[in-house]
Image (cartoon, helix red, strand yellow):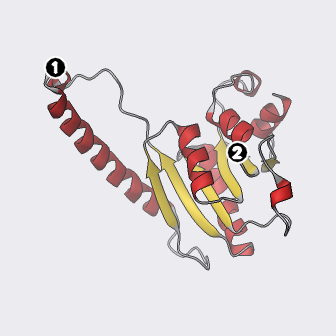
């Protein structure tokens, strides 16, 4: 929790190498061929954006920008909550498709037009809970680095002791180093 408190307050980016990172499988040393940038569009992510773009340019990395949508709430004010399951499923599909489309456009609008990157950007919008979606994507794309903002509300000391935050879960379970930027 000291490391987590530090990464939420540090005036510079902090790279964390969690317990699940296996360097023995990396014969060529640390290379950032594929970078997964997980964003929630918060202040930490906004601060991380120029850093991740610079890293991707310097290492000729493939950059994958990811945003995880909050899963649909269980409670609903929609009348379809009382309708047959097929109607609720249709409403859910429509909601998810619309939100996914808006989020994808928000990602594309958020990234500067001329990034100077060697590879085309890849965009991913998911609907898992944030940590699980980030970790699954990191495995699926064989990420060499995860970059994310480390936002804190209230006390960084308190946030560092909450074991279910996205930052905690990702750092603790990531298969690669995680670079966090405080927001």
Front one among 43 and 174 = 174
Circle 1 crowding by C-alpha within 10 Å: few under 14, some 14–19, many from 20 = few
Q: Distance between the residues labelled 2 and 1?
A: 40 Å
Q: Please report the residue visible at 70 percent of the width from the left and 45 percent of the height from the top.
A: 174
Residue 121 position (above or below residue 177): below
Q: Please report the residue visible at 67 percent of the width from the left and 52 percent of the height from the top.
A: 147
Element carrying mark 1: helix
Residue 38 location (% of width, % of height): 58, 50
Left or right: where 124 falls relative to 171:
left
Residue 32 location (% of width, % of height): 74, 65
Quadrant in which residue 165 is drawn: top right
Number of numbered discs present?
Answer: 2
Q: Name the residue under label 2.
A: 174
Element carrying mark 2: loop
Quadrant in which residue 65 is drawn: bottom right
Quadrant in which residue 91 is drawn: top left
Q: Name the residue under label 1.
A: 82
Circle 2 crowding by C-alpha within 10 Å: few under 14, some 14–19, many from 20 = many
């Amino acid at each position: 929790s000291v490391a987590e408190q530090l990464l939420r307050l540090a005036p510079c980016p902090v790279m964390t190498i969690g317990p699940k990172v296996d360097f023995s499988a990396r014969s060529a040393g640390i290379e950032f061929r594929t970078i997964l940038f997980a964003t929630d569009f918060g202040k930490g992510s906004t601060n991380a954006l120029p850093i991740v773009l610079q890293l991707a340019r310097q290492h000729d990395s493939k950059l994958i920008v990811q945003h995880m949508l909050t899963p649909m709430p269980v409670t609903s004010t929609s009348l379809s909550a009382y309708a047959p399951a097929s109607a609720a499923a249709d409403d859910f599909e429509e909601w998810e498709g619309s939100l996914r489309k808006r989020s994808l456009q928000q990602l594309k609008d958020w990234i500067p037009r001329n990034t100077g990157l060697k590879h085309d950007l890849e965009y991913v919008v998911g609907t898992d809970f944030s940590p699980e979606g980030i970790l699954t994507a990191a495995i699926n794309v064989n990420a060499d680095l995860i970059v994310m903002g480390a936002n804190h509300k209230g006390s960084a000391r308190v946030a560092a002791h909450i074991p279910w935050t996205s930052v905690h879960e990702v750092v603790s379970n990531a298969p690669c180093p995680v670079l966090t930027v405080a927001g």
